[in-house]
Each structure stands twice: as C-alpha cells, then as structure tokens.
Image (cartoon, grey):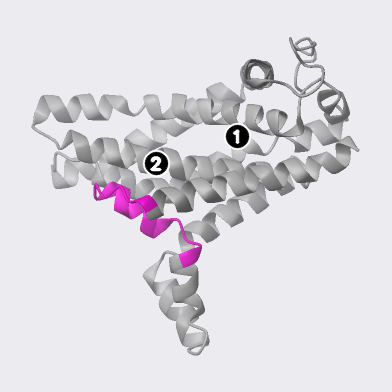
Amino acid sequence: MSPAGTQRSLPGASGSPGFPSFLEGLRVVAGREVAAYFDSKIAYVFVIAFVVLANWLFMSRFFLTGLVDMTAFFDSMPLLLPFFIPAVTMRLWAEERKSRTIELLLTLPIRTFQAVLGKFLAAFLLFGLALLGTLPIVVMLVWLGDPDLGLIASGYLGLLLMGALFLSAGMLISALSCDQIVTFVVSSLVCLLFVGTGNEWAVALLDGLSPSLSAGTFLYESFSVIPHYDAFVRGLIGLSALIHMLGLSLLFLWITAQILERVRE
C-alpha cells in the first residue's frame, strides 16, 4: 500500500494551478510512489533482476561473437521488457483501487492528470535506474575497443521511448482493474502485442489470412513498436518514430486520466 504520510496541500493549489504548483504536484505524487516502490521492496527486486538478466543475455552472446557493439543487447530488450515493465505498473492504480486509497489520492488539491503523470514519472525513474545498471557494458566495450557511442546512445534513446510506451500502456490497464495479477497478465499480453506485430512471420501470417485487408502490414506500420525501435538501434532517429512512440504514450496517459476522472466524480 502506498504511504499516506505524504498527502498534503500544495502551494497555490486553489483554483487553476500555475506551472510551479503543477510541478510541485508532480513532485509530491512521484515522491510518494518512489517511496512506495522502495518500501515494498519492488524497486530492489526489479532493478536487480533486470540488471542481472540483461547483462547475462548480453555477455552470453558477446563471448560467442566477440563483437564490440551493443546490438545483441538492444535486440533482446523487446522480449525482456513485456515481462518486466508490467511488474512495475501493475500496482500503480490496481492497488489504489483495491485498498480504496484512490479516493484519498484524488481528493488532494491536484488535477487528475498530475496524479497520472506523477505516477508515470516514478515508474519511469525506476526503469531509468535499471538501465543505469547496464552502463558497465558500455564501459567494458570502450575498454576493449572502439564502439560507436553515437549508435549506442541512439539505442538507449529508443529503449527509453519503448519503455515509456509500455509503462503508459501498463498504467492504463492498471486503472481498469483492481487485481494486480490480472493487470500484470493483461499488460504483458498488450506489450507482447506491440512486439509481436513487428515480427515478419506474424505479419506474413496475418496478411495470408486476410489478403484483401493486409492486416499484418497495417499493424506493422501503424501499431507495432518494433520498426520504430529498430530504427533507433540502427542509429536512425526519425520524426515519425518519435511521434509514434511519444504520441501513443501520451494518448494512454490521457485515457488513464479520463478513466480516473469518473472515479473522482
């Protein structure tokens, strides 16, 4: 359960909040959630498990290929995140609804979108902390050879954007459920759908089932995160990829806020 001790009034909260009080609201909610992550030990388990598994997957392939780049690391992330990200988001709103603390949170003098964005920032910070644990790979590659640091930076940017998309989707599902296990399973399936629709075999199968609709190609081009993520891994930072990943993330956060507005009313 999230600690209630941080519930307090925000400066300038009466009426329509200005930008300083908006940021203060985000800070309060995000701080509340970060404290809850570490109090419940979720943060420690998530970070340690992610870092150990991500580094192991990279090193197991690195010793076989000997290539001084991180392509193998970034290629493994779309299969790893659909199971790790839901572990972070499953409690964000489902736990609030089950313990009936959501009403207390939404009675704070903050806007609903502030609460949603604050929780998202807390989850994103935890994800970023886990990624920091993979930076020793970069240090090792620099020590061993001359990797393309620009390509690595582009890959990490794509990874952050994909993580943000999965986090926002997981938050939306968490807002619809009171059960954390159900939230975890459904969120994992949705994230796998984002990944699976970018698989060439899946695209060919769906196109073969509906040649006139070309459903596989449509999902690949309009829904899947993989073509956009792969572009970042190859060092191609395109506007369409940024719009797709950031736009869907903001859309999911906005829908989450609309759902919670009904609870507030």
Helix, strand or loop under label 1 = helix
Sooner in the amino-acid sequence: mark 2 or mark 1 = 1
Q: Amino acid at mark 2?
A: Leu
The stretch in magenta equals: 222-239
Q: Amino acid at mark 1?
A: Val
* Residue corresponding to mark 1: 88
* Residue corresponding to mark 2: 159
Q: Are marks 2 and 1 in contact (CB under 8 Å)?
A: no
Residue density around tag 2, few if under 14, some if 14–19, many if 20 or more, within 10 Å = many
Residue density around tag 1, few if under 14, some if 14–19, many if 20 or more, within 10 Å = many
Residue extending farthest to the bottom is 212
In which quadrant of the rendered view does residue 50 lie? top left
Question: Which residue sits at x=77%, y=16%?
Answer: 13
Q: Is residue 54 visible to the viewer in this orientation of the structure?
A: yes
Instruction: Provide residue 235's location: percent of width, then percent of height.
Output: 24, 47
Relative to 9, residue 16 above or below? below
Q: Nearer the viewer, residue 101 or 180?
A: 101
Q: Is residue 234 magenta-colored?
A: yes
Quadrant containing the N terminus in the rendered view: top right
Quadrant containing the C terminus in the rendered view: top right
Helix, strand or loop under label 2 = helix
- Asked whether, in this view, residue 154 is left or right of residue 128, the answer is left
Instruction: Provide residue 207's location: percent of width, then percent of height.
Output: 46, 82
- Between the residue at mark 2 and the residue at mark 1, the CA separation in whole angstroms equals 16 Å
Q: Nearer the viewer, residue 17 or 112?
A: 17
Q: Is residue 227 magenta-colored?
A: yes
Question: Which residue sits at x=76%, y=16%?
Answer: 3
Instruction: Provide residue 181's location: percent of width, then percent of height.
Output: 72, 44
Instruction: Provide residue 195's location: percent of width, then percent of height.
Output: 47, 58
